[in-house]
Image (cartoon, helix red, strand yellow):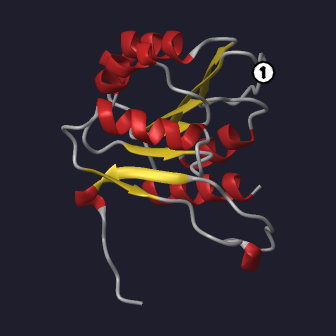
Amino acid sequence: MSTAVALLILAREMQPERTFELGTFIGNSTRSLAIHSNHVWTCDGSNDIGLGLPNVTQYRKTTSTDALKAYKADSAKSGPINLFFIDGRLVQEDAELVRDVTDADTVFALDDTYQLEKGTVNVNFLGGVLKDRALFFLPAPRGEPFAHLGVPGHTTLGLMLNSARMVLLKA
């Protein structure tokens, strides 16, 4: 639940035109992203759940590679992804596609960014694929970041974003 809240807050702050989600599963994160995104494209290689949301294009039972190819074929009218949520495992075939459908301002949200889980592997993968971009990795917050909102639990959601987007505040 905390990850869904974190994605909701992130999308609210960004108000992205184009959000891409890798790993629909049951659609909780998709629903969170769709509230504040103009449009969400989402895929899941093993799940066929139908969400029926008007601003969501689903690639059901579709691998990340095939979904990114479909997005790229349509990107002439849609443009680069603004927010890319990755809750699956990127594969080598995705490397050039990720470069093609994102730009220097794309924010990557990656779930399971701890130890050697898929999110950490994806951070390293993206760092190699996008080494010409000034990306900064912001790890998941510690503790229960939304307990004050009545949402218990921790999140493993980390972010990769252009360092120029960072704003440091004095607390």
Residue 127 rendering spot, x and y as whole percentages: 33, 39
The total number of labels drawn is 1
- Residue depicted at x 59% and y 50%: 115
Res 63 → quadrant: top right
- Residue linked to disc 1: 50
The quadrant in which residue 79 appears is top left
Q: Nearer the viewer, residue 37 or 69?
A: 69
* Residue sitting at the far front: 116
Residue 38 seen anywhere in this rendered image of the structure: no
- In the displayed structure, does residue 137 sit left or right of residue 139? left
Q: Quadrant of the N terminus?
A: bottom right
| 38 or 98: nearer the viewer | 98
Q: Amino acid at mark 1?
A: Gly
Place of residue 62 in the rendered image (x, y in percent of width and height, measured from the top left): 63, 11
Question: As rendered, which of 131 and 104 lies closer to the eye?
Answer: 131
Q: Is residue 67 visible?
A: yes
